[in-house]
C-alpha cells in the first residue's frame, strides 16, 4: 500500500506477527531457546507458589471442618 504523507508517497509495511517471530526463533536458535532462562525463574517463583498453595489448602480444610462439623 502506498500512502501520501506531506505530499510524499510512503510504502506501508505491516510488522510481522507473533507466529512469524516464533518461526524465526525456532529456525535460527532452535527449540531449546524458547526455554532458556526458565530454570532460575522457576527457582524464584516456586517457593511463593508452594506457600500460597499451603495456605489455601489449610484454609480449605479448616473451613470445611467448621462447616460440616457444625451441621
Image (cartoon, helix red, strand yellow):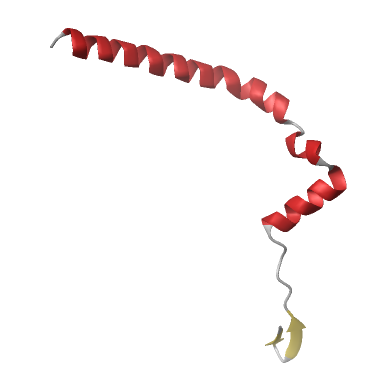
Extreme residue in the right direction: 28
> Which quadrant would residue 20 be assigned to in this image?
bottom right
Residue 62 vs 8, above or below: the answer is above
User: Which residue occupies 25% across, 9% down?
Assistant: 65
User: Which residue occupies 39% across, 15% down?
Assistant: 57
Closer to us: 32 or 14 = 32
User: Which residue occupies 75% across, 88% down?
Assistant: 9
- Viewed as shown, does residue 59 lie left or right of 45? left
Residue 27 vs 6, above or below: the answer is above
Closer to us: 2 or 68 = 68
Quadrant holding the C terminus? top left
Closer to us: 71 or 18 = 71
Extreme residue in the left direction: 71
Residue 14 vs 53, above or below: the answer is below
- Viewed as shown, does residue 61 lie left or right of 13? left
User: Which residue occupies 65% across, 24% down?
Assistant: 42
Residue 22 vs 63, above or below: the answer is below
- Viewed as shown, does residue 34 lie left or right of 49? right
Q: Position of residue 41 (x, y in %)?
A: 67, 27
> Which quadrant would residue 8 be assigned to in this image?
bottom right
Amino acid at each position: 500500500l502506498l500512502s501520501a504523507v506531506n505530499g510524499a508517497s510512503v510504502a506501508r509495511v505491516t510488522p510481522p506477527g507473533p507466529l512469524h517471530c516464533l518461526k524465526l526463533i525456532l529456525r535460527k536458535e532452535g527449540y531449546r531457546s524458547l526455554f532458556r532462562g526458565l530454570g532460575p525463574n522457576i527457582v524464584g517463583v516456586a517457593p511463593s507458589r508452594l506457600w500460597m498453595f499451603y495456605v489455601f489448602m489449610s484454609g480449605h480444610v479448616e473451613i470445611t471442618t467448621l462447616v460440616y462439623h457444625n451441621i
